[in-house]
Amino acid sequence: MRAGISTTLIFASLLLLSACGTPDEPAARESTLAVTDARIRMPAAGMDMTAAYLTLRNDTATAFEIVGFESPVTDRIELHTMIQDGDMMRMRRLDRITVPPGETLALEPGGLHLMIFALPDPLTVFHATLIGADGRTLPVEFAVVPRGGH
Ligand SMILES: [Cu+2]
């Protein structure tokens, strides 16, 4: 009985230690999420909206939740996915995109993507800040690619 109680106490204090240690560790923060292959499609002639794609890699043991993107270029960036509706594919807006721990998630044509509205014409550069559900942010530079390009 005695041994049982002290084991429980030690376990509880270890949990407290790790809970306190995690949030302030700068290295852990920076290695949370890696973004590669970020690109935005050139809008069609006369259009001010388009889609953007990127690949997200989460090398930590906890899920990373993205709740949006902000950009000085436009204030209208939405998270979208494609859903099958009969024989049509439709876009649906999402509140968040989750990158599971240890996994790579690609936003790519035909699936998850960013929908970007109210873009300047011509579009020459595009950059945005990824916003995490926990308040963390990550700047992302997008390559502007021709329409039809992946
Ligand atoms: Cu869309």
Image (cartoon, rainbow, N blue to C red):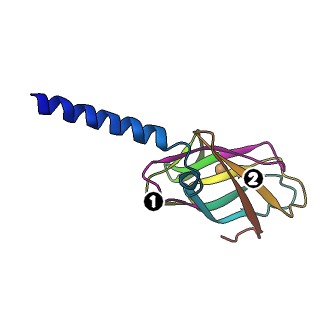
Residue 75 located left or right of residue 103: right
Looking at numbered disc 1 in the image, what kind of residue is underneath it? Answer: Glu
- Would residue 47 be seen by someone viewing this image from the given angle? yes
Q: Position of residue 128 (x, y in %)?
A: 75, 52
Q: Residue at x 79, y 64 (%)?
A: 42
- For the view shown, which residue lies furthest in the right direction? 121
Residue 79 vertical placement versus 40 (above, below): above
Residue 96 vertical placement versus 52 (above, below): above
Q: Position of residue 122 (x, y in %)?
A: 90, 61
Magenta range is 55-78
Q: Position of residue 76 (x, y in %)?
A: 76, 43
Residue 84 located left or right of residue 75: left
Circle 2 sits in a helix, a strand or a loop, which is it? Answer: strand
Q: Residue at x 34, y 34 (%)?
A: 13
Q: Callout 1: 10 Å neighbours few (<14), some, many (20+)?
A: some
Check disc 1 and report the residue beneath it. Answer: 103
Quadrant holding the N terminus = top left
Quadrant holding the C terminus = bottom right
Q: Check mark 2 vs ligand 1: CB closer than 8 Å? yes or no.
A: no
- Would residue 109 be seen by someone viewing this image from the given angle? no
- For the view shown, which residue lies furthest in the left direction? 1
- Tell me where residue 12 sits by quadrant: top left
Check disc 2 and report the residue beneath it. Answer: 128
